[in-house]
Image: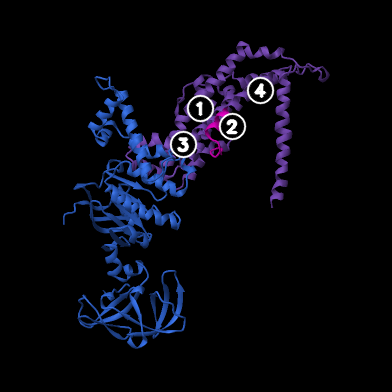
Chain colours: A blue, B purple
Amino acid sequence: MNKKPLIELINVTKSYDGEKVVDNLNLTIYENEFVTLLGPSGCGKTTTLRMIGGFVQPDDGQIIINGKIFNDLPPYARPIHTVFQRYALFPHLNVLENVAFGLRNRNQEYLTNFFGQQEIDRLYKEANPTHEKKNARALHKVIQKMIDKAAADALALVKLTGFENRKIDQISGGQQQRVALARAIVNKPQILLLDEPLAALDLKLRQNMQYELKEMQTKLGITFIFVTHDQEEAMTMSDRIVVMRSGLIQQLGTPKSIYNEPVNRYVANFIGETNIFPGTYVKKDLVNFLGVDFKSQGYNFENNEAVDVVIRPEDFDVVDLEKAKLVGKVTFSLFKGVHNELDVDINGVKVMVNTYETYEVGQSIGLSVDPYEIHMMKVENNG
Amino acid sequence: MGKTFKVLAIPYQIWLYILVFVPLIAMVLIAVSNYDSSVPLNQINISLNHWSILVQRQNMIAFRNSVVFAVLTTLISFVLGYFAAYHIFQSKFKNKFIILTIVILPMWSNLILRVDALNNIFSQNNIISSIIGFSPFGNITGKPIAILIGLVFTYLPFMILPVYTALEKIDYALQEAALDLGLTPFKKFWKVIFPLSIKGVVTGSIMVFLPTLAGFAIPKILGKGNFLFIGNVIENKLLSSTIFYNHGSLLAVVILVFILGSILLLTRFDKEGETLL
C-alpha cells in the first residue's frame, strides 16, 4: 500500500435526539481519491460529510486529517472546502467576488504561504522596480492582483471566463454550480466536499458535469468526497463507493466490485436493478436456484446452506430452448434504445432480463447464466 | 376573479384620491398663498411673504431640534435594534414569533398613554417612587434625555422588525459557506450577514426617522415645552387664535421634502421594496 491516508474516521458516532445518524463509522480516504458516499436520504451520508467539513461535531470517535485529530477544529481552520447542495453563493457579490471571497478574507500570513514568498517578491519587484524597501500598500496591491488572477484562473477552469461581473441571479443554475466549484477550488483545498452538487441540474447537464468533475479531480489532484443518492452518478465518477444505510457502512469498494459483488440485498437493490433468488449452496461450485442446479465459481459456504443468489439482468444469456437451463415466458418487453428490458416468468417467478434481441410478449425463451456471473450472498434475516 | 378584486379595490382608490392626494395638493397650494383664518375665501391670493418664517430663529431651532433628535433616535435605534434583531435571529428559541409579538406589544396601547406613563416615571414623584421610595430615573422629565428615551422607546420596534425580517431571509448555507471559505465568525458577520441585512437597516432607519422628524406629541409631553420641534410649531400655527394655514402648510411641505428624499434613498437600496413590511 503506497497510498497515503488523508482522512481517517475512527469509530465516529453522531446522534440527533437520541437517534444514531452515524453509527461507529470507520473509513479511510486516501490522497487523490474520488470517494462517493452513497445512500438514500437519512442514511447519514450528509452528516458524515458535515463532520469532515467541521459543521457538525461528532459525539464520539475521531476525525484524523493528515495525521492530526480535527474533531474540534472550526471549519475555517481546515484544509477543506465544500460545494454546497444549493451552492450558497453570496447574492451581494458578483461572480468574480464570489470566487475571490475566500482568499480576499485571509490574512497576510496565510496569503504569503498560499502564493509563496518568492512569487510575491518576484511580482512585487516587477510592479515596483524602484522600491528599496517593501511598502505595505504596494504589497497589498500585488497580493490583491494575485488573488484576482487566481480567481480568474479558477473561472477559466470551470469555463466561465467572461462572466466575472455578472450578478449571481443573472446566471443559470448550471453556471451557479460552476461558480460554487470555482469558489472552492481557487483555495486549493486538499479535500473538496461535494454535497449532492448536481441534484438541481437537469439530466443532460448533470451527465456533462459528472465527466467534468472527474476530469477536474484527476487534473487538480484534490481528494473529492462526493455525497449522492444517485447510484449512476456514483458509478460514473468514483474510485471508491461507500454504500451507507442508517448510519452504517454497508459496503466499501470500487464501483465494479460493488456492482458485481454486492454484500447484501440492500446494496444489490440499491445499486441498479437486479434479480435476487433464494437458493441453496449445494456443494463447492454448485448452486441450486429456481429449481435448477448451476455451476458457480469462487464462493465458500457450508454445503446445503441457504444463500441469496444475485444475477444482474444483463448477465442472463438468451439461448435456444433445448440448450436452456431455464425456460420462461416473456410477460413484458420494453425497448430502451440500446437494449430491450424483458420480464420473464419462470414457474411463477419474475426474472428481469436485458437483451439486445427483440422478443414478443408471450414468447417462450431459454436462459442460461455463466458460472462467473452468479453471485451469492449470505441470507440476511432483516432482508 | 380579477374583476372582483378590481371592484373591491375601488373604496381604497377613492380614499386615496379624496383623503390623501387632494389634501396633499391643497397643502402645497396653501403653502404658496396668503390663506389664514382672518382672510376671507374670496381674497385668497398667491403670496410668498410668509416664507420668511423659514428663516425665523425660533423655527430654525425647531428644525434643528427635530433633525438632531431624529438622527440621534435613528442611530440609537439602529444600534439597539440591530443587536436585538440579531439576537432573536441567532437564538435557538423555537417560537420566535412570540418574541416579535412581545416587541410590538407596547404598540397595542395608545401612544399618548404610553408617553404619559413615561413622563410620570421620569418625574420626581411617581408610582414607582411611592412603592420603592425613590425615583429610578431621578427627575429627568423636561430634559433632552427624556425626549430621546421616549422617542427610542416608541420607535425601536420599527427598527427591530425590518432588520429581523432581512436577517431571517439570509440563507443559513451562506453562513456555512463563509466559515467554509476560511472566515472567522467575526468576519463572517461583517462580510456576509451585515451586507445582506443592510436593506432592513435602511428600511428600519426610515421608519424611525420619519415619524420622529414630524412628530410633536412626544417632545411636547416629555419636553415639558422646553424644546420646540417643528411638529410643535405646526401645531401652534393651527391652534392659535388666528389659524395660520399657510404657515403650517409651508412647514409641512418642508417635512414632505425630507420624506421624499428619504424614500428616494430607500429605493436606491431596496429596488423591490421587499423589506418594507
Q: Residues within 10 Å of mark 3 (few under 14, many from 20)?
A: many
Q: Earlier in the sequence, mark 4 or mark 3?
A: 3
Q: Are marks 2 and 3 on the same chain?
A: yes
Name the residue furthest left. Answer: A1
Q: Earlier in the sequence, mark 2 or mark 3?
A: 2
Gap in angstroms between the C-alphas marked 2 and 3: 29 Å
Q: Which residue is mark 2?
A: B111
Q: State which chain disc 3 sits on.
A: B
Gap in angstroms between the C-alphas marked 1 and 2: 19 Å
Q: Which residue is mark 4?
A: B253
Q: Residues within 10 Å of mark 4 (few under 14, many from 20)?
A: some
User: The disc labelled 2 sits on which kind of residue?
Assistant: Leu
- Between marks 1 and 2 in the image, the one whose residue lies nearer the viewer: 1
Query: Residue B74: within the magenta?
Result: no
Residue B274, horizontal then vertical, whole percent: 54, 40
Gap in angstroms between the C-alphas marked 4 and 1: 22 Å
Left or right, A200 with reference to B207: left
Which numbered tag is attached to residue B197? 3
Residue segment shown in magenta: B262-277
User: The disc labelled 4 sits on which kind of residue?
Assistant: Val
Residue displayed at 68% across by 14% down: B51
- Between marks 4 and 1 in the image, the one whose residue lies nearer the viewer: 4
Q: Are marks 1 and 2 on the same chain?
A: yes
Residue A31, horizontal then vertical, whole percent: 23, 51
Q: State which chain disc 4 sits on.
A: B
Gap in angstroms between the C-alphas marked 4 and 2: 25 Å
Q: Earlier in the sequence, mark 4 or mark 1?
A: 1
